[in-house]
Image: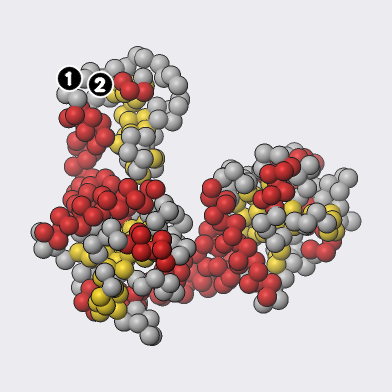
Amino acid sequence: MDASSDEIDTDKSLLHQLLTSETRDFLVSPSGDQIKVDELEGKTIGLYFSANWYSQCQSFTPLLANIYNQLKEQGARFEVVFVSSDEDQCAFDNFHGTMPWLAIPFSDLISKKSLTQKFQVEGMPCLIIIDICGKPIQTEGVELIYRYGVQAFPFTQEKIAELEDEEEANRASQTLEKLLSTQTRGHVIKQKEQVPVSTLVGKTVGLYFSALSCLPCEKFTSRLVCVYEYLKEKKEAFEIVFISTDQDEAGYSGCYQSMPWHALPYGDESAKVLLKYFNVKGIPSLIIIGPDGKTITTEGRYLINLHKEMAYPFTEMHLSLLQERLDEEAKSYPRSFLHVGHRHVLNLVCSDSGGGPFICCECDELGLGCAYQCIECGFEVHLKCVREANEDNPEKEHAGNSDPCSS
C-alpha cells in the first residue's frame, strides 16, 4: 500500500476508512443483510482473516464464536469482521453462515487485499484487534483468545499485562494437586478405579491431551505406550494422565481403552481449564510436569518422537546432553542423501544452517533442528528416519549430490 492511501481523511473516522471503499459503506451479515459501518463506531473490533479450506480456521472459528457470544451476553462493545480468503462466493456464504458476525463482502477483492497488506497478514487464522478509536492494538488476537478467552477483552496492553502477571503468579505457585484436583474431586482414574492425585506427587507426570478421532494421536499414543511401559519396567518415577478432548463419552472410552495410564474422568471441567492454561492449540500434546509440580516442558510430544525413552526425565540439563550427542552424531552423516523412493537429493541442515521445526515426510511426526531437506519441494526427514532406512536397507546407495528434485 502506498503512502497516499494511508493518509487520514479528516471527514471520516479511522474505522470508516479501514472498512469501507469508494463504492461501499456497509458490511454484510451472515444472512446477507447490509449493515452500515458507522454502526460499529465506538466498539472494539476484531478483523478476522480466515478461510473455510484451512483446518486451523475451521477449528478456531467455533472457539471465537463462543467468546464473541459470551462477550455479547455481557454487554461488551465488541464486534468481529470476517475478511475472507475463501475460494468462491458459495464457499464464503457457507463459512460465513457458521459465524455470528459481519464480513467484508466477498466481491470486494480490493478491500480484502488492502487490509491483508496493511496488517501484513501472512498466515491464518489471524485476528487483528482494533480499539474504539480505529487504531490497531493487538496483532496476535488468535493467541490471546487461546490463552485468555473472554478475559482478554478489551485486549488493551494494560489488560494483557494484568493477565500475564496473574499467569506468572499461578505458575509460580503451581503444584500437581492444583492442576489435577478440584474442590469436589481429589482423584484421577485408572481403568475405572479412583487413584488419589497425592500418589502422583513427587513424580514426573505427563499430561497427555488426545482424542479418538485424531489420526496423529493414534500413532503417537502407540509410541508413548512403548516408552511408558519401558520406563515402568525400569522402575522410573514416571506417570501419565490422559486429558480427553473427545466430543462424547464413546470417543473418550474408545481412546482411553488403549492406554495403560491414568486419566481425568470424562466430562471433567478441568480438561478445558488445562487446555487454556497450557495454551494447547493442537493434539496430540504432551505437557511434562516435574517432581516439584512445576512445568518442565510443553514439548513432550516432540521430545518423545526424537529421543523416545531417552528423553526422560526431560530436564533441561539432560536434554542439553542429548542434543550435544545428536549434533555430534550429525557430523557423521553425509552432507546429502539420495531418497531413492522419492527421487530426491536432500541436503543436511541444522539450526545454524537453515534447520527449524518441520513435519517428517517419512513418519509424519514433528521434528526440530538437524534434518535432510529439499528446499525446492519442501520434503524433509528426521535423521533417525534416515538411520532406520539405512539399517533396513544396508545395500542401498543413499549418498548423492547432483540429481535434481522431481515431483
Q: Which colour scheme is used?
A: secondary structure
Residue under circle 2?
398
| Near-viewer residue (277 or 197) | 197
Q: Which quadrant: the C terminus?
A: top left
The percent coordinates of residue 178 (x first, y second) are 35, 78
Residue at the location (83% across, 57% down)? 33
Q: Viewed as shown, does residue 331 lie left or right of 119?
A: left
Name the mark nearer the viewer: 1 or 2: 1
| Near-viewer residue (86 or 21) | 86
The percent coordinates of residue 248 (x first, y second) are 45, 65
Instruction: Kindly indicate the quadrant of the structure image that contains residue 231.
Output: bottom left
Q: Which amino acid does label 2 sit on?
A: His
Mark 1 element type:
loop
Mark 2 element type:
loop
Q: Would residue 287 be seen by someone viewing this image from the given angle?
A: no
Residue at the location (19% across, 29% down)? 392
Give the total number of marks visible in the rendering. 2
Instruction: Kindly indicate the quadrant of the structure image that contains residue 157.
Output: bottom right
Q: What residue type is labelled 1?
A: Glu
Label of residue 395 in the image: 1
